[in-house]
Image (tube, rainbow, N blue to C red):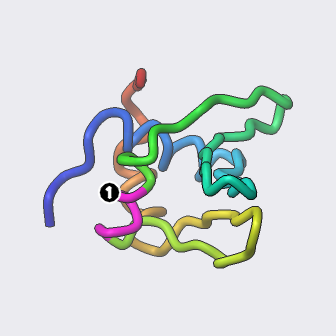
Amino acid sequence: MLKPSKAEIKILCALADGSTLKSQRYLDGTKIYQLHSLAGQVEPVQKRLVEALLRRGYIISNQKFPAATYSLTEPGREMAAHSNQVPHSM
């Protein structure tokens, strides 16, 4: 399995620390991804990062429309725990 990028690891660690990754689809077909911290901060996330984490099996989606929430899988939790000791930046 390919090792996640620094940006992907940052997302995994944020999820492990309690942040929520959500996507929102609009009527015009636009879809945005955002990471919501426990402190209320919202950070945009690139689609390619979410797709890579899904493809690698680190996160799963609840498949809701128009707003979906993504959760860590066991491999995602393990990767976050392994990587959480190093500071990350997107």
Label 1 secondary element: helix
Residue 34 image position (x, y, % from top left): 65, 41
Main SS type for the magenta part?
helix
Q: Is residue 15 above or below residue 59?
A: above
Query: Which of the 4 image quadrants contains residue 40?
Result: top right
| Residue depicted at x 76% and y 66% | 66
State left or right for residue 77 relative to residue 22. left
Q: In this view of the protein, which residue sits in the foreground, 18 or 54?
A: 54
Image quadrant holding the C terminus, namely top left
Q: In this view of the protein, which residue sits in the foreground, 60 or 68?
A: 68
**Residue sitting farthest toward the front:** 28
Image quadrant holding the N terminus, namely bottom left
Q: In this view of the protein, which residue sits in the foreground, 7 or 82?
A: 7
Residue 5 image position (x, y, % from top left): 26, 40
Q: How many marks?
A: 1
Tell me, yes or no, whether the highlighted magenta stretch contains residue 25: no
**Residue sitting farthest toward the left:** 2
Q: Which residues are magenta?
A: 51-56
Q: Residues within 10 Å of mark 1 (few under 14, many from 20)?
A: some
Residue where numbered disc 1 is placed: 52
| Residue depicted at x 70% and y 65% | 68
Residue 76 image position (x, y, % from top left): 43, 63
| Residue depicted at x 46% and y 74% | 74
Which kind of residue does numbered mark 1 sit on? Ala
